């Protein structure tokens, strides 16, 4: 009798523990979904096109003058994962057989935000290709993955540029999260074979650290648990984790000629972190430039210094 009761208790406890464990895993998975989808779908309901216009207006940039001087030609490309996205091509005289700069905008906007940067290249005789990042503008993929998936779009644009001007220079220049995308792309074999240089302006250096910047620990949900749950859900549903989007770590595979621009007054992508990213770049053909400005504003309020740094680097 006692053995029977004991056996039943053991079975009951085992079942209870199983329920707790399963419930715990289920709860972690659900919480991981909240973390991941909130991060990846950060622009749901966000008018990124309007954001670009408002930001340029706030900064006093004359977009109408740019549009009057430079008319872009728009078309669509397809990345290797099937994602279709819009690209805009700019040229000063219609001659596409020139050096080409592929520009990548920052978070929360679209390709229009790149107009001041495009202007710099166009004034110096370059062709320019801009596009909307995933999760921004008219890009069909709603996910923001800090360069992990976005780098496939960059590869497709590089392939296009190479067909148009195979004997000319092709470079990739990204700002903020676009800088992260440029950095993630620079670490690929495709970049090593097809791109002449990469420029990262105030780049995001880690998806996890950017997530940490908006996360607030609560009594019951510490940051480490949020990351663990996020990794679980991310890996099962998307095939990668926070660790795979450590842009700074990825620079150990970057063998491309690289310029990193550090904004000294940057409170978004901290200067010391950007410098660490630069130090991790594997190639010896690299340069770090410091500009006394706020996050990615060098192209506007320090245009002469910014232009000289970029063009001198590319001329080497």
Image (cartoon, rainbow, N blue to C red):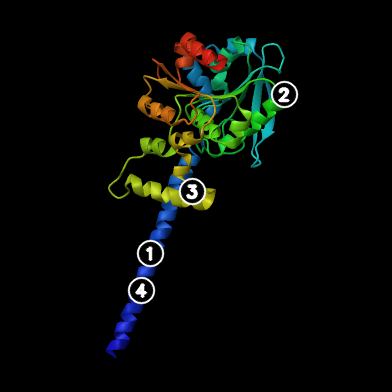
The answer to which image quadrant residue 157 occupies is: top right
Measured in 3D between alpha carbons, the distance from the residue under mark 1 to the one under mark 4, in whole angstroms, is 10 Å
Q: Which mark is residue 234?
A: 3
Q: Is the Cβ of the residue at disc 2 closer than 8 Å to that at disc 1?
A: no
Q: Position of residue 169 (x, y in %)?
A: 63, 20
Q: Callout 4: helix, strand or loop?
A: helix
Looking at the rendering, in which quadrant would you find the N terminus?
bottom left
The answer to which image quadrant residue 195 occupies is: top right
Q: Position of residue 279 (x, y in %)?
A: 41, 28
The answer to which image quadrant residue 168 occupies is: top right
Residue for badge 1: 21
Q: How many residues crowd mark 3 within 10 Å: few (<14), some (14–19), many (20+)? A: many
**Number of on-image labels:** 4
Please indicate whether residue 201 sits to the left or right of residue 49 in the image.
left
The tag earlier along the polypeptide, 3 or 1, is 1
Please indicate whether residue 207 sits to the left or right of residue 255 in the image.
left
Residue for badge 2: 164
Residue for badge 4: 14
Q: How many residues crowd mark 4 within 10 Å: few (<14), some (14–19), many (20+)? A: few
Measured in 3D between alpha carbons, the distance from the residue under mark 4 to the one under mark 3, in whole angstroms, is 30 Å
Q: Callout 3: helix, strand or loop?
A: helix
Q: Position of residue 13 (x, y in %)?
A: 33, 74
The tag earlier along the polypeptide, 4 or 3, is 4
Seen in the picture, residue 130 relative to 116 is either above or below; the reply is below
- Residue found 36% across the figure and 65% down from its top: 20
Q: Give whichever of 74, 259 is nearer the camera.
A: 259
The tag earlier along the polypeptide, 4 or 2, is 4
């Amino acid at each position: 009798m006692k053995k029977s009761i004991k056996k039943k208790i053991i079975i009951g406890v085992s079942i209870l523990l199983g329920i707790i464990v399963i419930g715990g895993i289920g709860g972690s998975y659900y919480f991981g979904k909240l973390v991941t989808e909130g991060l990846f779908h950060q622009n749901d309901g966000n008018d990124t096109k309007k954001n670009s216009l408002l930001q340029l207006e706030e900064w006093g940039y004359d977009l109408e003058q740019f549009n009057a001087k430079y008319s872009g030609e728009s078309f669509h490309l397809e990345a290797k994962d099937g994602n279709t996205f819009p690209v805009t091509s700019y040229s000063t005289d219609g001659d596409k057989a020139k050096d080409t700069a592929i520009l990548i905008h920052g978070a929360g906007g679209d390709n229009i935000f790149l107009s001041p940067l495009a202007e710099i290249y166009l004034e110096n005789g370059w062709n320019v290709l801009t596009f909307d990042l995933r999760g921004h503008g008219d890009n069909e993929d709603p996910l923001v993955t800090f360069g992990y998936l976005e780098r496939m779009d960059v590869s497709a644009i590089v392939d296009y540029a190479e067909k148009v001007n195979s004997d000319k220079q092709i470079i990739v220049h990204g700002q903020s999260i676009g800088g992260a995308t440029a950095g993630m792309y620079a670490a690929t074999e495709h970049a090593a074979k097809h791109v002449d240089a990469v420029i990262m302006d105030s780049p995001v250096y880690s998806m996890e650290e950017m997530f940490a910047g908006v996360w607030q620990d609560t009594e019951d949900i510490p940051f480490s648990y949020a990351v663990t749950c996020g990794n679980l859900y991310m890996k099962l549903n998307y095939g990668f984790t926070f660790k795979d989007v450590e842009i700074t770590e990825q620079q150990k595979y970057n063998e491309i000629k690289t310029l990193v621009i550090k904004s000294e007054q940057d409170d978004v992508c901290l200067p010391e972190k950007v410098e660490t990213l630069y130090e991790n770049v594997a190639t010896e053909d690299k340069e770090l430039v410091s500009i006394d400005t706020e996050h990615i504003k060098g192209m506007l309020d320090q245009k002469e210094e910014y232009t000289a740094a970029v063009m001198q680097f590319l001329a080497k």
